[in-house]
Amino acid sequence: MEATCVSFLNNGRCDVLFNVPNYQYDEGDCCASTCISSHCGANGLTKAFGVNLNSIGDGFPNCIDPTMVSLTIHLNSFTSSRNKEVFFLNLTDVQLEEYYKWKGIEFWTENPRSAYFIVDCNGVNVMSIHVNNTMENKSETIMVEEGAMCRISVSNTTNVFDKWDNDPIWWVDYTVYDGNDKTIEIISGYSGDAESINFYHLPQCYFEKLQNFINVSRAYVTNDASANALAWLAGDKSGYSSCENDFLIERFALSALNFAAPIATDCYRSMEEDDSLWISTEQQCRWEYIACNKGSVETLAVRSKCLNGTLSSSVGLLSGLRRMDYGMYCPLGSTDF
């Protein structure tokens, strides 16, 4: 009996009978981030976004490992590439007549092809399915590893930009939410503008440790300094941005200061740098413009960093700060405490 059970474990297929704690959730077969077979999730989805799939998709609908976290994807709307409001070429009556003679279908009313909707997290496929307008205004919840870096790609079988009379396609407008409801928005995408988007899932421990200093509902807002700081922390794999770090709050504060007052564009271009960050993945007390006392930031002097922006209120989280000097190019001036 034991030998028979072993043959079902860790084989890349989720066996519901063994999807329990005693068998380590089929030894990882039921979740994308724990399955290690070459065909994990293959043909695992027959239904998604409340619709029975015409062609079987790949996915992990039975992932119940409690170490995983949920993301909810909502398909807001579908737009045909033949929609006259978005179609990018002016067609003549002759072209439209020739198209009808060729295919026996009116150009503007031809049904679009389904789009291929792919979700990858930490380099592993979580879901791959064909989507169409029958799924409009419907949601699907997937399970991913906490803190995962994810990418959603919406590819199509034809490219209307190559040739005007290629088959029509569906362009998808969608939104990703943290959790199993639509309370905390992470990001939105529209495949008519960009085929793919990238985003981080923020670890729950960040919310718990920083709950008194951040607005959770704005944790993923891209034009918010605190949200950008959280995303930077989530992407930092140095270990210094982990929730176990005693000085995480100070590291968050410095990150928020950076995104509120980054290096001015003209300055970092002239210095041949490739971004506006004056923070780094090193432990913050090792930064050349910081001095610490017992691990806590005591001096912040970014004198020559050519900063441009505003002073984030997160500076108040640097409880040990005694001196702050933004230097010559910073519009904020120099402040001593």
Image (cartoon, grey):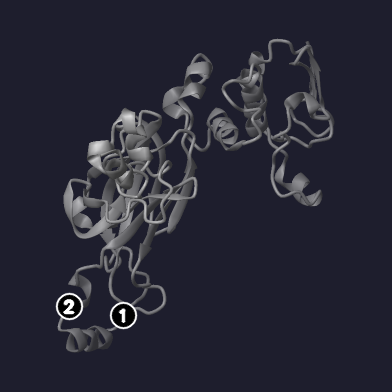
Q: Residue at x 33, y 35 (%)?
A: 25
Query: Does any portion of residue 72 appear in the rendered image?
Result: yes
Above or below: residue 286 compared with residue 110 = above
Mark 1 sits on what residue? 165
Quarter in which the C terminus is drawn: top right
Q: What is the secondary structure assignment of the residue under circle 2? A: loop
Residue situated in front as seen by the camera: 35 or 314: 35
106 horizontally vs 257: left or right: left
**Mark found first going from the N terminus, 2 or 1:** 2
Type of amino acid under label 2:
Glu
Q: Residue at x 55, y 30 (%)?
A: 230
State which quadrant residue 168 falls in.
bottom left
Above or below: residue 99 compared with residue 197 = below
50 horizontally vs 152: left or right: left
How many labels, in total? Answer: 2
- Position of residue 267 measured from the top left corner of the image (x, y, whole percent): 77, 45
Q: Which of the labelled discs sits on residue 106, or is there none?
A: 2
Above or below: residue 60 compared with residue 56 = above
Type of amino acid under label 1:
Asp
State which quadrant residue 16 falls in.
top left
Residue situated in front as seen by the camera: 3 or 14: 3
Query: Does any portion of residue 336 appear in the rendered image?
Result: no
- Position of residue 130 measured from the top left corner of the image (x, y, whole percent): 27, 59
328 horizontally vs 23: left or right: right
